[in-house]
Image (cartoon, grey):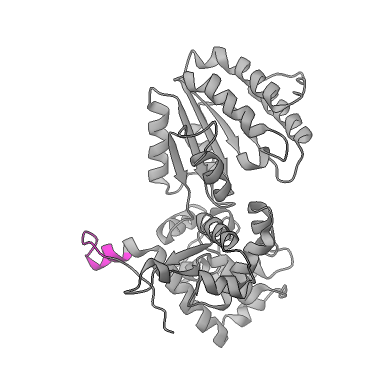
Amino acid sequence: MEKLIGRAGEIKVLQEALLSDETELIAIYGRRRVGKTFLVRNVYQKHMAFEFTGVHSRGMKDLLQNFSFALKAAKGSKVDLAVPGNWNDAMHVLQNFLDPVVQKKKIVIFFDEFPWIHTQKSNFLSAFEHFWNAWAAKKTNLKVVICGSSASWMIRNIVKSKGGLHNRVSRRIRLLPFNLHETEAYLKSRSVKLDHYHILQIYMAIGGIPQYLKAIKPGQSAAQAIDSLCFSKNGTMVDEFNNLYASLFDNAGAHISIIKALAKKTKGLTRNEIMDVCKLSSGGTATLLLKELTESGFIMPFIPFEKTSKDTIYKLYDEFSMFYLKFMVGKHAAGTWLTMSQSSSWKSWSGFAFESICLKHVSQIKEALGIGGILTTESVWRYA
């Protein structure tokens, strides 16, 4: 398996959960392609007893079929298993399989893309709640990991559940993109050797998402890598913007509308300004949309210097979304970025992109300045 880069804090949490003498329900969330699945498999590969992955936009029948395939693999059976009729039956079959195993040793079961398993009218979540409360919670050797790319769904339905999983999550991890140091280490592990300036250029365009960085080839300059990923006909990132939001939010149009509005106003917008620009009639709807985008890491609220929370402004916080809306829309021809990176628009964009990266690396900047141990506050400047 590929070497795990960074994630020291997250690895520690998972290892402590494995060593504990209690049942563990671990919730992991983070945006698409950030490395959640890789992290879990890497840390728990020797203890994995069962793994099942949800599929976007698939019905309950197909998912139950996939569940039977996953159980067949876990059992090491060569014979196809009967497909459960519903999720209650599926959880009961899983319980019967795990019961003799969990009494002998510590095991991990892993539900990946958990929100995609809970399809409309499937009752999967209630079946899982019963599985946990009636059986799993009593097995101290059992560690259950549930992952989801939809951070808002995971927080609403799992971490802050008001139903059967209320206060059941023992540990949670919000997996963030790589920082600049981790990005450099990851690229080096793949024999991509670039200086700090070129790594910064790549980070400003696509951020620290491991799956994006994985497509960069050794020997490419930053401009060549960006051009290949984002502007060539078959580039990895060409269709990523729409796919990204559609996979995370049920009705992504309103979310994308807010992202586009913030991309045009690099100084940021207040909640009321966002409602006005995006023509949102309900304050409750606006609050929910902003919360979901914030929890998913696409936008970030900031209190301006010497202001209060009522003056909070929201800024676009995702490098790739900013880059896509500024440069990529309607442009799909090899060599495009090699030309555009010399333009005046590149200079204005790079300034705001660099500011965003600085905000993400405040702790590292403070350490470099020798003020890491001093109580400070950070804010953004907005002139009106």
In the rendered image, residue 145, in percent from the top left (x then y), is placed at 52, 34
Magenta stretch contains residue 371? yes
Residue at 51%, 77% (x, y): give it: 266
Is 256 on the left-hand or right-hand side of 28? right
**Is residue 223 at least partly visible in the picture?**
no
Is 99 on the left-hand or right-hand side of 379? right
Toward which corner of the image does residue 87 lie, by quadrant?
top right
**Is residue 65 at least partly visible in the picture?**
yes
Between residue 323 and residue 188, name the one nearer to us.
Answer: 323
Magenta stretch contains residue 5? no
Between residue 374 and residue 192, name the one nearer to us.
Answer: 374
Q: The magenta stretch spans which residues?
A: 365-376
Circle count? 0
**Is residue 210 shown above or below 254?**
above
The quadrant in which the N terminus is found is: top right
Is 313 on the left-hand or right-hand side of 99? left
Residue at 60%, 60% (x, y): give it: 285
Residue at 63%, 67% (x, y): give it: 281
